[in-house]
Image (tube, rainbow, N blue to C red):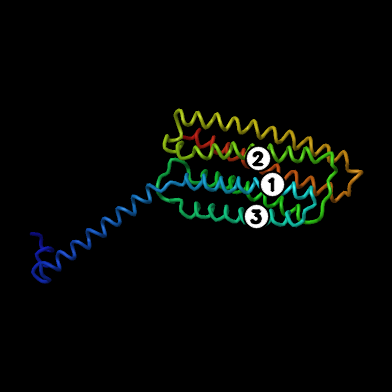
């Protein structure tokens, strides 16, 4: 019998010794459980949630432009309010991921790279909100000849977001595969597809800008510049989706 145990046993009684022992055992089990939960908590599920919320926000671009072209101020306000709400929810998910990322435990990817990836995802919602804000600054008119290309641009951007969302849905499987092997090859193929669809949105955006400036004599100069900035900001939605894919490509290359 150890001196410590003997002292406790003789001075406090056997019942108190057992109580002390059980307390220490429960504390040890609780500590081990906390460490296990910290190790087992993956940030890749929340990154999927963030991407889904950001894409849900970007999907409001189509009803927003439909409302603008229909001069439906009530609908413009409704969609703008929804965009603001979804962007706020995306910010909440982003902040939760940042706050819960372990700072000292080893992860399969560099913490800074993962933070950059979630920044790209969140910027999809941010750019959508920025475009909605500019559309609400003043009542804007756009020549009818440009409207089909605007809708085409939005549709191409949403295709880009959908591909980026499919890539993010593979993040947990990719992490389980240590960012290598067949799963990594699958994701790299999807990233190449993402690059292709984003390029299509760039082509539509450049064509639209050229058409806009070709009609500048028929429009107010301030409207021309504001529409150009709107088209640029909407295009950033697709750019951030592509940059998210390229950041993931880097993570795979570093594995």
Q: Secondary structure at mark 3?
A: helix
Q: Relative to 88, is 66 on the left or the right? A: right
Task: Measure the alpha-carbon separation of dots 1 and 2.
Answer: 9 Å
- Residue occupying the point 74% across, 44% down: 232
Q: Secondary structure at mark 2?
A: helix
Residues at badges 1 and 2 in contact (C-beta under 8 Å)? yes
Q: Is residue 74 above or below residue 249?
A: below
Q: Relative to 115, is 81 on the left or the right? A: right
> Where does residue 126 sit, x and y in percent of width and height?
64, 51
Q: Quadrant of residue 23?
A: bottom left
> Where does residue 142 sit, x and y in percent of width and height?
83, 46
Looking at the image, which residue sits at the far bottom? Answer: 11
Among the two numbered marks 1 and 2 on one chain, the one whose residue lies closer to the N terminus: 1
Which residue in the protein does label 2 denote?
A: 158
Closest to the observer: 90 or 247? 90
Which residue in the protein does label 3 denote?
A: 82
Residues at badges 2 and 3 in contact (C-beta under 8 Å)? no
> Where does residue 252 sit, x and y in percent of width and height?
50, 34
Task: Measure the alpha-carbon separation of dots 1 and 3.
Answer: 11 Å
Looking at the image, which residue sits at the far right? Answer: 217
| Circle 3 crowding by C-alpha within 10 Å: few under 14, some 14–19, many from 20 | some
| Circle 2 crowding by C-alpha within 10 Å: few under 14, some 14–19, many from 20 | many
Among the two numbered marks 2 and 3 on one chain, the one whose residue lies closer to the N terminus: 3
- Residue occupying the point 58% across, 45% down: 121
Q: Secondary structure at mark 1?
A: helix
Task: Measure the alpha-carbon separation of dots 2 and 3.
Answer: 17 Å
The image's mark for residue 71 is none
The image's mark for residue 61 is 1
- Residue occupying the point 60% across, 47% down: 56
> Where does residue 155 sit, x and y in percent of width and height?
69, 38
- Residue occupying the point 20% across, 61% down: 22
């Amino acid at each position: 019998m150890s001196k410590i145990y003997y002292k406790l046993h003789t001075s406090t009684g056997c019942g108190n010794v057992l109580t002390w022992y059980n307390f220490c055992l429960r504390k040890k089990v609780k500590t081990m459980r906390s460490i296990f939960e910290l190790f087992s908590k993956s940030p890749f599920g929340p990154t999927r949630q963030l991407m889904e919320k950001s894409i849900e926000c970007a999907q409001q671009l189509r009803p927003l432009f439909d409302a603008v072209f229909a001069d439906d101020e009530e609908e413009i306000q409704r969609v703008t309010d929804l965009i603001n709400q979804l962007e706020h929810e995306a910010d909440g998910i982003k902040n939760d991921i940042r706050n819960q990322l372990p700072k000292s435990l080893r992860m399969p990817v560099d913490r800074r790279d993962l933070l950059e990836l979630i920044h790209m995802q969140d910027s999809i919602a941010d750019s959508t909100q920025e475009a909605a804000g500019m559309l609400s600054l003043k009542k804007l008119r756009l020549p009818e000849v440009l409207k089909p290309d605007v809708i085409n641009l939005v549709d191409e951007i949403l295709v880009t977001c959908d591909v980026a969302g499919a890539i993010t849905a593979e993040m947990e499987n990719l992490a389980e595969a240590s960012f290598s092997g067949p799963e990594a090859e699958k994701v790299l193929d999807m990233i190449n597809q993402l690059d292709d669809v984003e390029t299509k949105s760039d082509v539509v955006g450049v064509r639209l800008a050229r058409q806009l400036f070709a009609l500048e004599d028929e429009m107010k100069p301030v409207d021309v510049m504001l529409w150009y900035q709107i088209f640029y900001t909407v295009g950033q939605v697709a750019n951030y989706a592509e940059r998210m894919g390229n950041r993931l490509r880097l993570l795979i290359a570093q594995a």
